[in-house]
Amino acid sequence: KKFTQELKKVYGAPNLKAAAAAFESFCRTWEQYPGAIEVWKRNFKFVEQLYDYGSDVRRIMYTTNAIESINSSFRKVTKKGAFPNENALFKLLYLRCTELEKKWNNGTIRDWSKVLNQLMVNEIFTSRIEKYLK
């Protein structure tokens, strides 16, 4: 629990400089677990890429709630029995996806207007987003 709390300070930092400082502190605090620290050191370059975006965009990117919700929903529908073939399973998962789409269709993302503004600043995303806003 404390390990993940320290790690949240890294990816919740306001900028890359603060994240790097939090990461160094994290590494010193948990140096008794060199395997875990080495994995994070090796992959920190991927964490750094998050700081190309604003804080509201980063919050959406690093949270896994939507993915965990889908996986949980899939587990619920597949634990009810055996499937005669692979297609039966695929059909069930497809039907569950359509149910989830209907359920989430009117959902909102927290601070979406801020997220959209932060994305629209980046020219790479502007043309992609504009075609959906029409």
Image (cartoon, helix red, strand yellow):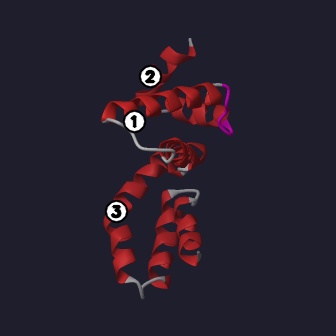
Q: Position of residue 82 (x, y in %)?
A: 41, 43
User: Real-space Cα distance between discs 2 and 3?
Assistant: 29 Å
Residue 43 numbered tag = 3
Q: Which residues are magenta?
A: 106-111
User: In the structure shown, which secondary structural element does the residue marked by tag 1 occupy?
Assistant: helix
Circle nearer the N terminus (1, 2) = 1
Q: Amino acid at mark 2?
A: Arg
User: Real-space Cα distance between discs 1 and 2?
Assistant: 34 Å
Nearest the viewer among 8 and 19 is 8
- Residue 54 seen in the current view: no
Residue 134 numbered tag = none
Do the residues bearing badges 3 and 1 touch, measured as CB atoms within 8 Å? no
Q: Amino acid at mark 3?
A: Asn
Q: Position of residue 103 (x, y in %)?
A: 64, 29
- The answer to whether 10 is drawn above or below residue 89 in the figure is below
- The answer to whether 87 is drawn above or below residue 68 in the figure is above
Q: Position of residue 122 (x, y in %)?
A: 47, 32
Crowding at mark 1 (Cα within 10 Å: few <14, some 14-19, many 20+): some
Nearest the viewer among 121 and 102 is 102
Residue 128 numbered tag = 2
Residue that label 1 marks: 89
Disc tally is 3
